[in-house]
Every structure is written in structure tokens, then in C-alpha cells.
Image (cartoon, rainbow, N blue to C red):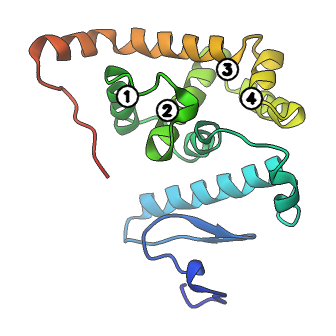
Amino acid sequence: QSNLNPSDDDSYNTGGVTRTAGTRMFVYFDGDYIHLEQQIREGLAYLVLSNMLYGGFTSSLKNSTLLNLPEWYTEGLISYLSRPWNPDIDAHVMDGFAANTYKRINALSGEEAKIAGHSIWQYISETYGEGVIKNLLFETIRSRSVDMGLQHVLGVTLSEFTKNWQIYYTAKYQNTIAAENIEGTPIIKSKKE
């Protein structure tokens, strides 16, 4: 409900984006129960991740200066936890690799960072196993560094890891991207939002 103890205008959610305020989560129901479930999963993943990264909701401001993770890491993890790999995400990732969008992973922001991050967590799950994700998350929090977390859990540096990730998806999409370049017309067009 939009009238449930609103404290300010930011508490209202009219755009369909899951928003949180402290321990409260606001979702927008557009009549699609699948979309509602995805928003709830996304909001819960965000709340749990924030709690893990910043040590609780009351101390988040104090601890936020100690841990600064790239957007692909956090938004990608939330996306990975809240929705399974699907053809839409697959098409966005393939378009990103076809256009060389993911060369500088830490410079990505917004939807690009979210999709690239989702593909990174999917890669970790498929290559190293899903159980490694929690170890990687805890080690990143403990060492306060993505690079150190990767080194301790996977045995590779961040630059080696991103290179392996790029090789993995380039090989996966190699035939489709080659066919797209030969024909001169894109096979899949990404949605511009």
C-alpha cells in the first residue's frame, strides 16, 4: 500500500522499481504476479546484501566508507539472486560482447553493469560451482577488496578473472556474433530503456 506510514515522497513507488528505506521495501504491482515476485526477490536480495556488506541497517553509513564495491559486483549479484538466467539476459550479454561494451568492467554503470555483473555471477556458478559464491562474498567482505576475494577463493587476480570471463562468453557467442557480422544485420537487438 502506498499509504502505509509514508515518511516522505521517496517512500512512494510509482515507477515499478523496488526501493528500500531502512528495513522497509516498496514494490509496485502492475498486475503481473511474476513481475511482483521478481521485485520482492530483488528487494530481499538487496536488503540481505546490504546487511552483509555494511553490518546492519543502523551502521551502514559508518561502514560504507570502508567497503566500496563496483556496481557490477553488487547490482549483478542482486540480479543473479533475484532472477534466473533467461533469453533476455542472454541476448543483452551477447550484444555487449558483440559491441565490446565489457572491455572496462569497472567503468560500467546502470543497466550495463547489472547485466554484465549477472553474467559474471552466472560464469562463477557454471565454472566453479554455486557454493563458491558465498565464499567469494564473505572473503570480499573480510578482505574489503574484490581482487583479494578472488585471489583467496578462486586463485586468480581480478584482471585474470575478467579475461577468463570474457574468453568464456566470447567462445559461447562466437558463432552467433560471426554470423551477425557476415550478414551485416543484427540478429538480436537489445531494448533501449
Residue underneath mark 2: 116
Q: Residues within 10 Å of mark 2 (few under 14, many from 20)?
A: many
**In whole angstroms, how far apart are the C-alphas of marks 2 and 3?**
19 Å
Q: Give the image location of residue 156, x and y in percent.
A: 73, 11
Asked whether, in this view, residue 103 is left or right of residue 75, the answer is left
Foreground mark, 1 or 3, reads 1
Nearer the N terminus, badge 4 or badge 3?
3
Nearer the N terminus, badge 1 or badge 4?
1
Q: Which mark is residue 96?
A: 1
Nearer the N terminus, badge 1 or badge 3?
1
Q: Give the image location of residue 97, x and y in percent.
A: 38, 22
Q: Give the image location of residue 115, x and y in percent.
A: 47, 37
Mark 1 residue type: Gly
Nearer the N terminus, badge 1 or badge 2?
1
Location of residue 43 with respect to 29 vertically, above or below: above
Judging depth in this view, the residue of 174 and 146 nearest the camera is: 146
Q: Residue at x 35, y 25 (%)?
A: 94
Mark 4 residue type: Val
Quadrant for the N terminus, please.
bottom right
Q: Which mark is residue 146?
A: 4
Residue underneath mark 3: 129
**In whole angstroms, how far apart are the C-alphas of marks 4 and 2?**
16 Å
Mark 2 residue type: Ala
Report which quarter residue 180 is drawn in: top left
**In whole angstroms, how far apart are the C-alphas of marks 1 and 4?**
22 Å
